[in-house]
Image: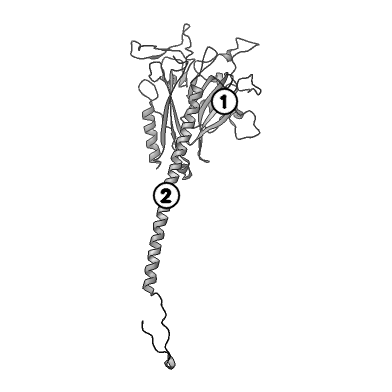
Amino acid sequence: MRTLPAPGGARRRAVAAFTLVELLVSVALLTFLMLILVSITDSAGRAWREGQNRTEAFQSARTALEIVTRELTPAVVDTRMQFVVAPGTILTDAGATNVAPNSPAMLWMAPLGTDGGLCCVGYYLYRDDQRQFYRLKRIYIAPPDTAKPSPYFPQMVSASNSQDPSLRTSPVNADWFTRTWDANAFNEEDVANDRAVVSSAADGIVALWVQCLDILGKPVPLVSKSTVHPPSALDYNSAAYFQVATSTAFENGRSFLYLAQTPQSMKANRVPAAVDLTLITVDSGVLAKGFSIPQQTNVYDATGALDVDASTKAYTAALQQNRIFNARTFSTRVKLVNGN
């Protein structure tokens, strides 16, 4: 770089500087590098969040299935007790709120706890679209001989009237469980309510299917679909009139038959041999985006049994129509020790 003579004949020292072009190139390069860094950071963060959401969904489903399996396996019935799978509306009628439409409710008795006392257990789906709560709810009523007996425990005996008709399990309804239940039984959010028998078992569960199986492993038709049994809204009822094949199918090829009510008809008083549980979860990241969660879809086959595969496919398609593509399906088969 040349130096020009200063006024008066003195020489000025040369000054180094960037040109405008050099500055523009430098800013462009820095901006490009920053964009790359932000993109890498965002991709890593998104991958981490998606991994966390997958883990959350898996843990929620595994927890739900493990809890239900543990309590469902020892389910028992006799002439005084009942095992029921029914539309969730039976709980709405008993005082429950926000029961998910088209979802089932399960109610049964089982020896649970440290002393093996006979407890009343149940599960159903809770759905609150405004608060984005989709939960599997658990009903648990301890035996009446505990330190804090519940007024909602199903009554099996009466010291004053052993012939009390309200003690008898019905072949067409689940009133034996719910006849004393009210809104307080389902209100777990009121800290002052000491009568609640409901708790949250798992979050993010948007659909649940319960498929009862007979001894030969075939799906049991719904009581409500039978044309010969007395009219009933239930899916499965241990106190219904039915026969089950034990080793080979009946002459008509079926392994489960409902019976008409006659003076000679007897209630079966049997739990299913096994129960298939299938659920679909949606992680909290999807719920936070405000996507609309469709109602559960139920599909039935020609015999009147629930078609779980067709039901899950139809519901998955409905989720995808609402731009929900990462819902996950989980299932397990629970063998009941008293079902054979």
Secondary structure at numbered mark 2: helix
Q: With respect to residue 272, does 4 lie above or below?
A: below
Task: Note whether 109 is above or below 21 in the view shown.
Answer: above
Q: Quadrant of residue 293?
A: top left
Question: Above or below — where is 130 with respect to 5?
Answer: above
Q: Nearer the viewer, residue 273 or 153?
A: 273
Residue 190 coordinates in the image, percent (x, y): 62, 35
Element marked by disc 1: strand
- Per the image, the residue denoted by label 2 is 44
Is residue 275 visible in the rendered image? The answer is yes
Label whose residue precedes the other's in the sequence (1 or 2): 2
* Amino acid at the residue labelled 2: Ala
Q: Is residue 143 left or right of residue 30?
A: right
Q: Are marks 1 and 2 in contact (CB under 8 Å)?
A: no
Q: Is 241 in front, or is 329?
A: 329
Q: Amino acid at mark 1?
A: Tyr
Q: In this figure, which residue is indicated by the disc labeled 1?
A: 140
Q: Quadrant of the N terminus?
A: bottom left
User: For this rendering, which residue is in front, 222 or 313?
Assistant: 313
Q: Rounded to the nearest whole Å, what is the CA distance between mark 1 and mark 2?
A: 43 Å
Q: Quadrant of residue 281?
A: top left
Task: Find residue 90 and report its horizontal and vertical position in percent.
Answer: 52, 25
